[in-house]
Amino acid sequence: MTLIAAALPVSLPGGISATITTAPVLAAAFDSTLPQPFAACWITFLGTFEPRDLRRELPWYGTLYNRASWILSVFAAWLALTVLQPYVRGGDPVTTTVQLVAVGSTFALVNSFLALMAASLRTHTPLGRVWALSLRNTVLGLAAQVPLGWLMAAIAVSVGHWAAALFMVPLLLARYSFSRYTETRELFFGSVSALSQAIDAKDGFTRGHADRVSRIAGAIARQMGLSEKLIEQIELAGLLHDIGKIGVEDRVLMKPARLDEDETELMRRHPIYGAAILEPSAALRPLVQFVLHHHENFNGTGYPEGLEGEAIPLGSRIIIVADAYEAMTSDRIYRKALGHDRAMDQLNKYKGIQFDPKVVRSLEQLIAQRGPQAFEASTLPPINYETLAALRQRLAHAPATRDVNAG
Ligand SMILES: [Fe+2]
């Protein structure tokens, strides 16, 4: 059962894969008819080999690390079980539950910590981000598997080991919900990204403008120590901040000359349009305030409301800096990039006037750490508006859509 469970991992963002191996592995530790702790450790060692281990997709030390972290987690769980065993009165629900919670928490603590460390080192992602992206969502699934493991062992002892196999049904259901979570998330981010590229194309910006604004804004937000949830909202708002330009007439949006007063007035409505476009979607509603105020100046001379200082949502204060920095450090049709140094000079010159000085300082610190090339290029490939024949040919040779559940 552990081998079947291990053969069906689900990849989560942040380099973590979730499995349903926890329940059968813990069942092995709970099973008092087996010679412990050797039985649990051996079952864990042999039963947690995944297809990627056999395909040699991981370096040998990766496979070793994973086996070691599984065995350590199960051993710690067994230790907790044994230490508490003298206090458990047979059949008493309170002490049994306490023991179960202790065993589960010990397992989860050791297992999550080791997985977190490995994923963070491997993907160079900060610990907090891996936690927010993946583990936060797997801990609940992991916790749910603990009582299931206990039940499996109880049924195996009283009815027979064959009966424990029936538990594969709820376990496979749990796996299904994991994979649905990943699919939904990818669908959401893919759609937002496609939308933001459509805005770039309409705006006449180089492709990836919004993508770079989003990455710079997210990095500033992280530098300022904001919560991962807020960082994600700011990144999404960075992608969609100019979505309201869809509602601005082309003659204004694309005008190569300076805008007159009426045209400026029309152009200045785009944050309001953007807010109106995002508002009906429950998933996008937290971004509305950031998009609505992304042209508010720190001294209150911006639009649409003329908010001042801290009254402007922090996300908007970050996006306006990221937007300005991105615009100055990338080439436009009508001018070459100013370059990092001159862009920073401009940001410093207008801090306290247009920009929040705290945000500018954070961007400065960030670039001092990562170097001026940190946000140089977008990772997106350029859009080529190809002919129908070229498109057909490319699609015929493109690799099949990647299966998110492939592990
Ligand atoms: Fe804008």
Image (spheres, grey):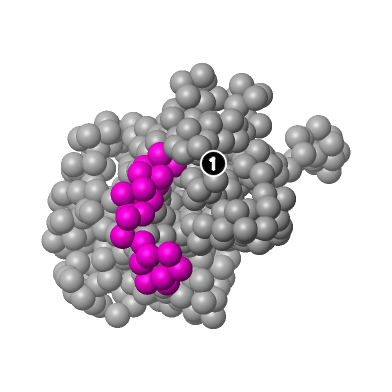
Residue 215 falls left or right of residue 167: left
Question: Residue at point 45% right, 68% down?
Answer: 91
Could you tell me residue 398's position as x and y percent?
A: 76, 35
Could you tell me residue 93's position as x and y percent?
A: 42, 72
Q: Residue furthest top?
A: 60
Residue 70 in sight = no
Q: Quadrant of residue 318?
A: bottom left
Q: Is residue 369 above or below residue 307?
A: above
Could you tell me residue 205's position as x and y percent?
A: 50, 50
Q: Nearer the viewer, residue 309 or 257?
A: 309
Q: Nearer the viewer, residue 10 or 228?
A: 10
Could you tell me residue 191's position as x and y percent?
A: 61, 59
- Residue type at the position of mark 1: Leu
Q: Is residue 163 above or below residue 39?
A: below
The magenta stretch is 73-95
Question: Residue at point 51% right, 19% down?
Answer: 60
Q: Is residue 13 magenta?
A: no
Q: Quadrant of residue 359?
A: bottom left
Residue 270 falls left or right of residue 25: left
Q: Which residue is mark 1?
A: 34
Image quadrant in which the N terminus is located: top right
Q: Element at badge 1?
A: loop
Image quadrant in which the C terminus is located: top right
Question: Residue at point 75% right, 35% down?
Answer: 399
Q: Residues within 10 Å of mark 1 (few under 14, many from 20)?
A: few
Residue 115 falls left or right of residue 3: left
